[in-house]
Image: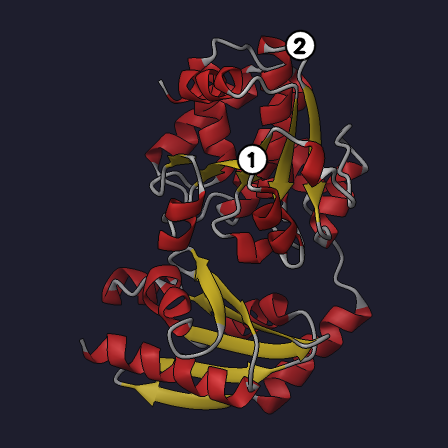
Amino acid sequence: MRFQSIMDFLERFNSNFVVLLCHHNADPDAICSAYTFSQVLRKIKPDLKIEIAAQGLSKLSKQILGTLPIDVNMSPRIEEAEVIFLIDTSTLKQLDDWMKRIENTGKKLILIDHHPLHPQTKNQAALCIIDDKASSTCEIIFELSKEAKVRLNRIEAQALFLGIIFDTKHFTIANSNTFKVAAELVNCGASAEEALSTLSLPMTSSERIARLKAANRLRIYRIGKWLLTVSHTGSYQASAARGLLSLGTHVAVVGGIKKGILRISMRSSNEFYITTGIHLGNDIAKPLGNHVQGIGGGHSTSAGFNGEGDLEVALRECFKLIKKSLKN
């Protein structure tokens, strides 16, 4: 059993303190899965000290912290932990400058994620709990809680429900197992009405301006019957990409550079993915790292890339990868 393998690992290294690390700008799936997993661990191993950490939170995650008792440390005691968990984090590069600290400690890593396993992480992690068929990491945490025979309380169930709703875009990309998990979480006390209210976030003026700038700067390409748009903005790349989808494009690629970090967000319509089979995370974002210094990954219709270098070069390579995938 996967959960037992985790407990055996903690016992083998006599772990009294562990850190659960979430990727930078941690989203609700990362934060909520880390929280509920920490609660499950505490119920099984009450003396275990646990710290949840993230280098920045998304706006929705900050809003969730106002409704649930989740404590996130921005200055984790990485060097003091016997074991480090990577939660919803496929590579150490998603931890920004914490990566070097982790590598320097030589501490054992356990990965829990629903993204496809990255070759680099496979070599670094001592234990990998991966299910790339799961719609979210929260879904995996729920299954681990069942393996541990831990009954979730209302708050823990609500946290997982929030993460699942977020990562499935309000169940629009959910699979059959996702709905089964959601039903069981409701039986544990989760409220769909409360979750939807928590995830309703008014768009700020800065985000609106970023979307409008992206729309003003976009370049439109037609490849067969598909429309691809490429643009750039200094912030809110993911939101801008979603905005371009709502305008009618089939694939939106929006990049930007902030504080020396190059970020690219990619979004595609469900129709594009179903018809072409092109997985933005596996087929575009991840291979982009072979052409531009950095690392990428993500889901079938939602992916991202973080790295360094020239923005125009990166956007051009991204476009070439999509065009090549369409031809293949």
Could you say which is closer to the camera, residue 164 or residue 90? 90
Question: Judging from the image, what secondary structure is the residue with disc 2 in?
Answer: loop
Query: Which quarter of the image is occupied by the C terminus?
Result: bottom left
For residue 272, the mark is: none
Question: Which residue is labeled 2 in the image?
Answer: 46
x and y, in percent, of residue 234 in the image: 69, 79
Three-letter residue code for mark 2: Pro
Three-letter residue code for mark 1: Phe
Residue found 47% across the figure and 43% down from its top: 171
Badge 2 crowding class, 10 Å Cα cut-off, few under 14, some 14 to 19, many 20 or more, is few
User: In the picture, residue 192 is in which quadrant?
Assistant: top right
x and y, in percent, of residue 114 in the image: 42, 42
Q: Is residue 125 visible?
A: yes
Question: Judging from the image, what secondary structure is the residue with disc 1 in?
Answer: strand
Could you say which is closer to the camera, residue 84 or residue 236? 84
For residue 85, the mark is: 1
